């Protein structure tokens, strides 16, 4: 009877040991080893980004997922660039991130606009002396990746009124609401009527400004700046030619042959938009009914700020009597205006 009892107890002991005796090594891992597990890296293994003030690198610190709840705060700091994410730590420039259930704590490093190296540090807040470092490089940036012109006309008439549309596209890494400052060396932005204008990017990360042409021939430079990065585009203001020319002889319809009966001819150079560029050369001609040149012009002027040019016509010494067609055109342009007078005896 006693032998059976001892055998039964022995069997129970062996069964109990067999059920609980399958253990994991981690179940008996020394707490010190769990506390000291920390690694630092980046998503994808990339360790350099452009120094454009926009690009970001995702940093990942890993602790043992079994670490105590009071030892799961990772503190990040960097010698260059800006940390995005987490919560401010007690020490300026540091950001705290709580590790998730997998033991990962992530934060983003935004590049500065200066080329050079950086050292990023991560430490476990509650474990003194436990830290890791990571070398990061900020390389020369392609500014087109930050801001670029997608619409910039190469030329426009110098008429003081035509509008040219300049559009830039900025990096999608910039936040919505980012402002773009446009500046020009010639012409004025509308509706500000100023050489500088500010626009807010839209949902497609674009901003547009309209430039009203200058009235003088020349080259203008339009600059667009976002996130302290500037791009520029040139625009040539070319001569604005007339759409029509209206002539007046001041009501005078006859001129005596000779040099004693002047006819003042005034030409109005007109455009559908704006004005003909001041300084445009006006060409005055006079022909008889056979198409032969006749008479002469004195004191011919170029087109002024009011869009007019004038000259004085004399029939000169001639035996011709009859109608004369006076014509005015802009140099190098086909549009012309005409008026008719009659040459009569002195």
Image: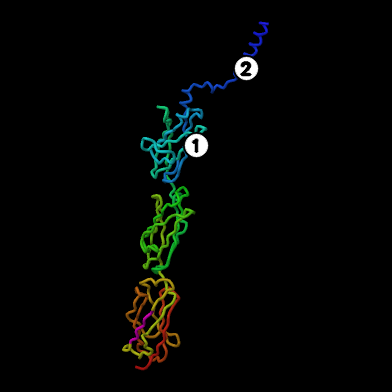
Q: Quadrant of residue 119?
A: top left
Magenta segment's dominant SS is strand
Residue placed farthest to the left in the image?
260
Q: Which mark is residue 247?
A: none
* Residue visible at 43% across and 33% down in the picture: 122
Q: Is 240 or 133 nearer to us in this picture?
A: 133
Taking the magenta stretch, the answer to whether it contains residue 149 is no
Is residue 273 placed above or below 182 in the rendered structure? below
* Residue visible at 50% across and 28% down in the picture: 64
- Side (left or right) of 209 relative to 1: left
* Residue visible at 62% across and 17% down in the picture: 18
First of labels 1, 2 by sequence position:
2
Residue placed farthest to the bottom in the image?
345
Which of the two discs, 1 and 2, sits closer to the camera?
2
For label 2, the SS is: helix
- Side (left or right) of 205 relative to 221: right
Residues drawn in magenta = 262-267
* Residue 292 drawn at (x, y percent): 43, 85
Is residue 262 placed above or below 39 in the rendered structure? below
- Quickly name the residue at label 2: 18
- Quickly name the residue at label 1: 45
* Residue 163 drawn at (x, y percent): 43, 65
How far is the residue under mark 1 from the one under mark 2? Answer: 45 Å
* Residue 6 drawn at (x, y percent): 64, 8
Q: Is 145 or 53 nearer to us in this picture?
A: 53
Q: Quadrant of residue 167?
A: bottom left
């Amino acid at each position: 009877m006693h032998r059976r009892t001892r055998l039964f107890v022995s069997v129970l002991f062996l069964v109990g040991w067999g059920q609980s005796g399958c253990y994991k090594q981690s179940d008996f891992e020394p707490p010190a080893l769990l506390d000291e597990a920390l690694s630092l890296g980046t998503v994808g293994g990339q360790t350099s980004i452009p120094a454009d003030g926009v690009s970001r690198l995702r940093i990942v610190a890993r602790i043992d997922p079994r670490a105590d709840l009071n030892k799961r705060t990772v503190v990040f700091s960097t010698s260059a660039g800006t940390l995005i994410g987490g919560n401010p730590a007690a020490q300026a420039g540091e950001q705290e991130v709580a590790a998730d259930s997998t033991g990962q704590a992530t934060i983003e490093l935004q590049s500065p606009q200066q080329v050079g190296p950086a050292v990023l540090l991560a430490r476990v807040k509650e474990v003194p002396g436990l830290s890791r470092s990571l070398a990061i490089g900020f390389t020369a940036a392609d500014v087109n990746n930050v801001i670029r012109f997608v619409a910039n006309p190469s030329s426009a008439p110098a008429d003081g009124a035509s509008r040219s549309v300049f559009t830039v596209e900025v990096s999608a890494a910039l936040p919505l609401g980012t402002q773009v400052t446009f500046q020009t060396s010639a012409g004025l932005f509308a509706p500000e009527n100023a050489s500088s204008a500010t626009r807010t990017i839209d949902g497609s990360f674009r901003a547009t400004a309209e430039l009203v042409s200058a009235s003088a021939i020349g080259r203008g430079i339009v600059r667009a700046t976002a996130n302290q990065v500037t791009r520029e585009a040139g625009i040539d203001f070319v001569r604005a030619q007339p759409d029509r020319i209206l002539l007046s002889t001041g009501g005078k319809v006859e001129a005596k042959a000779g040099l004693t009966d002047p006819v003042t001819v005034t030409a109005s150079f007109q455009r559908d938009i704006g004005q003909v560029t001041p300084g445009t050369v006006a060409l005055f001609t006079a022909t008889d009914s056979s198409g032969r040149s006749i008479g002469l012009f004195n004191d011919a002027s170029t087109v002024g700020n009011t869009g007019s040019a004038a000259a004085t016509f004399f029939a000169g010494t001639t035996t011709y009597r009859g109608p004369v067609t006076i014509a005015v055109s802009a140099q190098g342009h086909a549009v012309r205006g005409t008026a008719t007078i009659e040459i009569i005896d002195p």
